[in-house]
Image: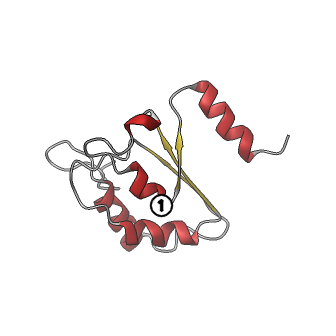
Amino acid sequence: NAEAKLVWFDGHSDYGHSFEVFAQKWPDAVTPKTSLLILGDARTNYRALSLPSLRSVVRHARRAYWLNPEPRREWGSGDSMAYRYGEVIEMVECRNVAQLTDFVGRLLPV
């Protein structure tokens, strides 16, 4: 958490800043062999989205998914930028074991 710089001094997460830091510090960490998985509610606390940084990381990954624990009906409410981030990376509602099982089942051959 400290290394990723996801949480600011005020205790609120900042996805945009963490995407920028990741893209700057570890530009070669994501390759065509990488599966990228982001976990979180996509709430920005009214901070910058940094879509170009996220887009850059996603573009280099073989696969990229964002598992969001909030109900889809709340995406876009308040400071939720799930739909905006969903324009760059596949956003998946994942609130329980059944949804996680469905997601993993989509990825693995049967």
Above or below, comparing residue 24 to residue 41 in the picture = below
Task: Identify the residue under disc 1.
Answer: 87
Q: Residue at x 38, y 66 (%)?
A: 51
Location of the C terminus by quadrant is top right
Number of labels in the image equals: 1
In percent of width and height, residue 55 lies at: 46, 69
Residue farthest to the right? 110
In this picture, is 37 found above or below 60? above
Q: Secondary structure at mark 1?
A: loop
Instruction: Name which residue lies at 50% across and 30% down.
Output: 95
The answer to which quarter of the image holds residue 69 is top left
Q: Is residue 87 above or below residue 68?
A: below
Q: Position of residue 39 (x, y in %)?
A: 46, 44
The kind of residue tagged 1 is Glu
- Residue 16 screen position, x and y as percent: 31, 60
Residue at point 60%, 70% (across, down)? 31
Where is residue 57 shown, x and y percent of the image? 49, 68
Q: Residue at x 25, y 61 (%)?
A: 48
